[in-house]
Image (spheres, grey):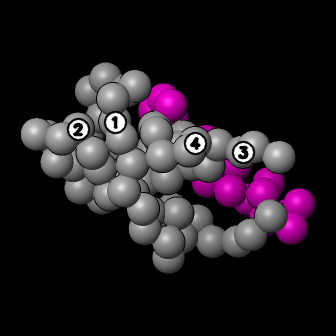
């Protein structure tokens, strides 16, 4: 099963186009190569190390709530 997870951008390295994102307490380095105009505190959908697109905070929280209700983990974006 492949899922794209909502995550909050915590920091961006403009030289490498990489970002540190958080999903709950989990932090991960991802590529922003596929997303234009991403900024710190934006929410993005991430999959296999890449941000796929920006989403609203409300959509991120709603998606994480649905995942939690389905037993796919809890927590939310930082």
Residue at the image point whose x is 48% and y is 29% from the top: 53
Q: Residue at x 86, y 68 (%)?
A: 71
First reached walking from the N terminus: tag 2 or tag 4: 2
Chief secondary structure of the magenta portion: helix
Find the magenta span and give its range: 52-71
Task: Say whether marks 1 and 2 touch (CB < 8 Å).
Answer: yes
Residue 77 visible in rendering:
yes
Q: Residues within 10 Å of mark 3 (few under 14, many from 20)?
A: few
Quarter of the image for the C terminus: give it. Answer: bottom left
- Residue under numbered circle 4: 47
For the residues marked 1 and 4, what is the alpha-carbon distance in whole angstroms? 11 Å
Circle 4 SS class: strand
Marks 3 and 1, how far apart at CA: 18 Å
Residue 41 seen by the camera: no
- Residue to which mark 2 is pinned: 17
Q: Earlier in the sequence, mark 3 or mark 2?
A: 3
Residue at image x 63%, y 71%? 75
Please tell me whether mark 2 sits on a helix, a strand or a loop: loop
């Amino acid at each position: 099963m492949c899922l794209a997870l909502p995550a909050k951008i915590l920091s961006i390295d403009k030289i490498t186009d990489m970002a540190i994102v958080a999903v709950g307490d989990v932090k991960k380095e991802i590529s922003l190569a596929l997303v234009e105009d991403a900024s710190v505190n934006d929410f993005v959908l991430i999959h296999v190390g890449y941000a796929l697109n920006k989403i609203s905070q409300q959509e991120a929280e709603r998606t994480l709530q649905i995942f939690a209700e389905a037993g796919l983990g809890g927590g939310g974006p930082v």
